[in-house]
Image (tube, coloured by chain):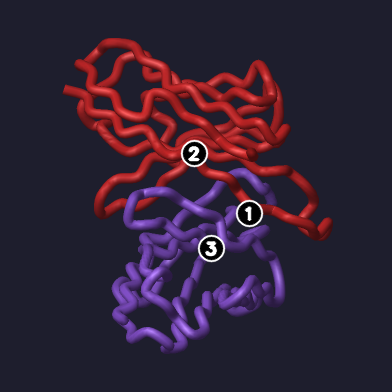
Chain colours: A red, B purple
Amino acid sequence: EAQVTQNPRYLITVTGKKLTVTCSQNMNHEYMSWYRQDPGLGLRQIYYSMNVEVTDKGDVPEGYKVSRKEKRNFPLILESPSPNQTSLYFCASRRLQTLAGGGEETQYFGPGTRLLVL
Amino acid sequence: KNEVEQSPQNLTAQEGEFITINCSYSVGISALHWLQQHPGGGIVSLFMLSSGKKKHGRLIATINIQEKHSSLHITASHPRDSAVYICAVYHGGSQGNLIFGKGTKLSVKP
């Protein structure tokens, strides 16, 4: 079954304690991305990756790190979490192709990780 | 001013009605996504389009690049269509940087 998995699904932590949220996809997709969703602000992109070893900042990258060493995995790292990083996080992936190429361009989303930083 | 604006913010419809949700954007884009977020929080990608029109079942998405506008239509709406519908655009020439609208909350009454 085609899917994007995230772990953990729920996490309560304290300020300053480093954490990693894992994201894995089984569809051999080139593109992977992390988003956060906050009430009143909607979804915002944190980082994205167009392929292995290629990552770029989204709109809200401050306080986050990512790496893309393998095609299937795209972990999100919070080196020193702060309360303003309390949020619902989504990972997603899709096949990367030219827009004129046609075919299925669905972006697959993970189930979300709810993070509370105290 | 938000770069991606959706209207309406909230929409209540009766089962069977034809529904239109609008998305306007102020930046150059390479493509646009329509997403559906269920009440439980899960997100599903409905369409990605860069021109013209796409149809999937009772859903139709159109985009007018010159007018910087896209619409999502739902024909013969059903209570199971109740969800938040989100428009997102790939900013500039990349297929990477995605900017989201705030979403339209749809409630379809039986």
Callout 1: residue from which chain? B
For label 2, the SS is loop
Q: Which of marks 2 and 1 is in front?
A: 2
Residue A59 bears which disc, if any? Answer: none
Q: Which residue is drawn at 57% across and 77% down?
A: B58
Q: Is there CB contact under 8 Å for labels 2 and 3?
A: no
Q: Which of A95 and B42 is in front in this view?
A: B42
Pointer 1: what residue?
B92
Q: Is there CB contact under 8 Å for labels 2 and 1?
A: no
- Is residue B28 in view from this perspective? no
- Could you say where residue B28 lies in the image, as x and y percent from the top left? 61, 62
Q: Considering the image in quadrants, where does the C terminus of chain B appear?
A: bottom left
For label 3, the SS is strand
Residue neighbourhood size for the residue with mark 2, other residues' Cα within 10 Å, grouped as few (<14), some (14–19), many (≥20): many
Q: Nearer the viewer, mark 2 or mark 3?
A: 2
Q: Which amino acid does label 3 sit on?
A: Trp
Pointer 3: what residue?
B34
Callout 3: residue from which chain? B
Using residue A95 as the reference point, say whether residue A112 is left or right of it. left
For label 1, the SS is loop
Q: Residue at x 30, y 51 (%)?
A: A41
Q: Which amino acid does label 2 sit on?
A: Gly
Q: Is there CB contact under 8 Å for labels 3 and 1?
A: no
Pointer 2: what residue?
A110
- Is residue B15 in view from this perspective? yes
Q: Which residue is drawn at 41% across and 17% down?
A: A20
A77 lies above or below B18: above
Q: How far apart are marks 2 and 1 (CA)?
A: 25 Å
Q: Are marks 2 and 3 on the same chain?
A: no
